[in-house]
């Protein structure tokens, strides 16, 4: 006999809620000494299931909110690290060489993320600074921001 697996997370949550409701109803039905009717058991199971579903939805909502906050915090940390690297190592007037600059040096350029810096490194070597645009690494607007701070020398 083949076992049916419960497919997705939602189905597992629903099944857990139903089983929990049934256990709670059966447990409380026999506790008061009066046997409950089938209708009373069903009604109590329905009420318990509604309460469990509400609690589960609140937990899901709280988890989503916490995940969004964590993502925001990670982005803030990354921006702070980039800013800290820039403040500690940048020399005014110092240009970054596109063909030999490190990933960190390139990522410190205005508007350049670590991902974009990685793209710059992957497409080396460059014979002109404007190849950043012609090779599709940067847009014209992005290039205009970094152009004064890059070199091939």
Image: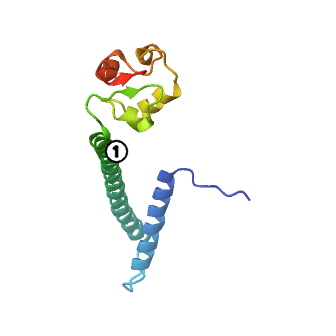
**Residue that appears at 33% across and 61% down:** 55
Is residue 61 positioned above or below 113 on the image? below
Q: Residue furthest bottom?
A: 33
Residue drawn at (33%, 63%), measured in percent from left and top? 51
Question: Which residue occupies the extreme front position in the image?
Answer: 153
Q: How many marks?
A: 1
Q: Position of residue 141 (x, y in %)?
A: 31, 18
In the image, what residue occupies the spot 38% across and 35% down?
A: 105
* Rendered view: 132 above or below 87: above
Please tell me which residue lies in front, 40 or 97.
Answer: 97
Relative to residue 143, is residue 49 depicted above or below? below
- The image quadrant where one finds the N terminus is bottom right
The image shows residue 107 at horizontal and vertical percentages of 38, 34
Of residues 16 and 22, the one nearer the viewer is 16
Quadrant of the snapshot with the C terminus: top left
**Image quadrant assignment for residue 54:** bottom left
**Which of the pair 73/66 is nearer the observer?**
73
Please provide percent x and percent y for residue 143. 34, 19
Colouring: rainbow
The spot of residue 120 in percent (x, y) is: 46, 27
* Secondary structure under the numbered disc 1 in the rendered image: helix
Q: Residues within 10 Å of mark 1 (few under 14, many from 20)?
A: some
Q: Residue reaching furthest right?
A: 1
What residue does disc 1 label? 78
Residue 20 falls in which quadrant of the image? Answer: bottom left
């Amino acid at each position: 006999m083949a076992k049916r697996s419960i497919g997705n997370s939602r189905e597992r949550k629903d099944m857990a809620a139903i089983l929990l409701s049934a256990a709670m109803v059966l447990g409380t039905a026999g506790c008061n000494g009066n046997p409950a009717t089938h209708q009373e058991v069903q009604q109590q199971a329905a009420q318990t299931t509604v309460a469990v579903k509400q609690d589960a939805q609140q937990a899901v909502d709280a988890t989503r909110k916490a995940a969004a906050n964590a993502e925001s915090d990670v982005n803030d940390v990354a921006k702070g690290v980039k800013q800290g690297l820039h403040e500690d190592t940048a020399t005014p007037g110092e240009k970054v060489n596109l063909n030999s600059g490190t990933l960190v040096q390139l990522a410190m350029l205005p508007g350049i993320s670590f991902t974009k810096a990685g793209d710059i490194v992957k497409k080396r070597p460059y014979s002109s600074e404007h190849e950043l645009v012609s090779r599709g690494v940067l847009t014209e607007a992005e290039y205009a921001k970094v152009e004064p701070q890059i070199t091939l020398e």
